[in-house]
Image (cartoon, rainbow, N blue to C red):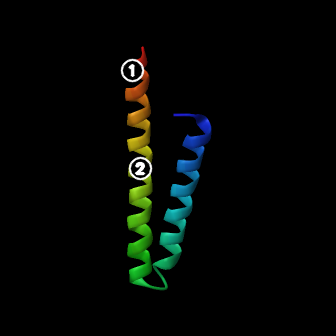
Amino acid sequence: MSKGLSLWFAASSIILLMVTAVSLSHSLWLALLFSILATCNIGWGFIIKAKRNRAEMNQS
């Protein structure tokens, strides 16, 4: 995975987790929504990394 893409997933995950923490004091439903989005974002990053690694292994 390129450094730019890794930085994107790291930064967006941190932002989503910070928004989740702030929304805990306002609304439980918003906190649940943002925590699900953060989890999906982190998982999506791992999926893209695995696909790119698999594609590189097949090309070698």
Q: Does 22 sit left or right of 59 as displayed?
A: right
Secondary-structure class at tag 2 = helix
Residue found 45% across the figure and 46% down from its top: 45
Q: At label 1, which amino acid type do we have?
A: Met
Residue 4 on image: x %, y %: 62, 40
Mark 2 and mark 1 lie on one chain; the one further toward the N terminus is 2
Q: Is residue 23 above or below residue 36?
A: below
Q: Where in the figure is residue 52, as x and y percent of width and height?
A: 44, 32
| Above-or-below relation of 4 to 56 | below
Label 2 is placed on what type of residue? Trp
Element at label 1: helix
Q: Residue at (44%, 23%) from the top-left corner? A: 56
User: Given the current orientation, which residue lies at the most extreme bottom position?
Assistant: 26
- Structural distance between the alpha carbons of marks 2 and 1: 20 Å
- Location of mark 1 (residue): 57
Instruction: From the top left corner, tell me how far across and down residue 17 is, in percent.
Output: 49, 63
- The residue positioned 41% from the left and 27% from the top of the image is 55
Give x and y (percent) for residue 31. Answer: 43, 76
Label 1 Cα neighbours within 10 Å, binned few <14 / some 14-19 / many ≥20:
few
Q: Which mark is residue 44?
A: 2
Assess disc 2: are there few (<14), some (14-19) or many (≥20) residues with their C-alpha within 10 Å of its C-alpha: few
Residue pushed farthest right? 4
Specify the quadrant that holds the C terminus: top left
Name the foreground residue: 54 vs 17. 54
Q: Is residue 11 above or below residue 17?
A: above
The reply to whether callout 2 and callout 1 are in contact (CB within 8 Å) is: no
